[in-house]
Image (spheres, grey):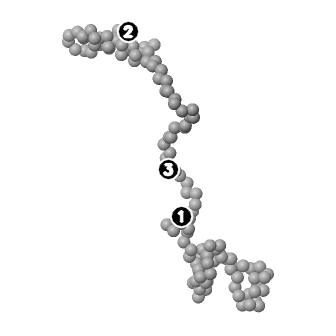
């Protein structure tokens, strides 16, 4: 129960008596505070389908960065000479090409075109 010693309703501390209506209202309110109100509200549904309510969808705020290289404004990471030329190919056929045709063989980025590859090789080896 309650921790108050006397179970009389609390009245405001001012001189003079409360009006009859005010005392009744105060008693009613104190009862509602003690016991709670039990007004059951039934929502009238007019549709046969129940739609899930739209809730607040917050934007992602990750604590860990998933990608080490950030994408630039253009969308892809910038194609510089180090990104275009990956590594030289050292298979037997590539070695034969180096000896016979005096030609170097490189593995390059899939998205690089011929002009970019040419300028990257010039930048690296000239």
Q: Which mark is residue 7?
A: 2
At horizontal 53% and vertical 66% (from top left) the residue drawn is 75
At horizontal 54% and vertical 33% (from top left) the residue drawn is 47
Percent coordinates x, y for residue 34 in the rendering? 41, 16
Percent coordinates x, y for residue 113 in the rendering? 61, 78
Can you tell which quarter of the image residue 101 is in? bottom right
Q: Is residue 54 left or right of residue 105?
A: left
Percent coordinates x, y for residue 23 in the rendering? 29, 11
Whether residue 112 is visible, yes or no, is: yes
SS at circle 2:
loop
Residue occupying the far right of the picture: 92
Q: Is residue 39 above or below residue 60?
A: above
Q: Earlier in the sequence, mark 1 or mark 2?
A: 2
Q: Earlier in the sequence, mark 1 or mark 3?
A: 3
Q: Earlier in the sequence, mark 2 or mark 3?
A: 2
Whether residue 124 is visible, yes or no, is: no
Q: Residues within 10 Å of mark 1 (few under 14, many from 20)?
A: few
At horizontal 52% and vertical 29% (from top left) the residue drawn is 45
SS at circle 3:
loop
Q: Are marks 1 and 2 in contact (CB under 8 Å)?
A: no
Q: Residue under circle 1?
A: 70
Q: Residues within 10 Å of mark 3 (few under 14, many from 20)?
A: few
Q: Is residue 117 above or below residue 74?
A: below
Q: Is residue 93 above or below residue 42?
A: below
Viewer-side residue, 51 vs 116: 51
Can you tell which quarter of the image residue 112 is in? bottom right
C-alpha gap between disc 1 and disc 3? 19 Å
Name the quarter where the N terminus is drawn: top left
Residue occupying the far left of the picture: 15
Q: Residue under circle 3?
A: 59
Viewer-side residue, 44 vs 34: 44
């Amino acid at each position: 129960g309650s921790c108050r010693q006397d179970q009389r309703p609390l009245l405001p501390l001012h001189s003079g008596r409360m009006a009859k209506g005010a005392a009744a209202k105060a008693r009613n309110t104190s009862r509602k505070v003690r016991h709670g109100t039990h007004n059951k509200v039934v929502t009238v549904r007019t549709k046969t389908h129940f739609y899930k309510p739209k809730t607040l969808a917050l934007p992602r705020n990750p604590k860990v960065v998933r990608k080490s290289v950030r994408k630039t404004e253009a969308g892809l990471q910038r194609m510089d000479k180090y990104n275009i030329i990956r590594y030289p190919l050292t298979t037997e056929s590539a070695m034969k090409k180096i000896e016979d045709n005096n030609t170097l063989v490189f593995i390059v980025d899939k998205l690089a075109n011929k002009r970019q590859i040419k300028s990257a090789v010039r930048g690296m080896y000239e």
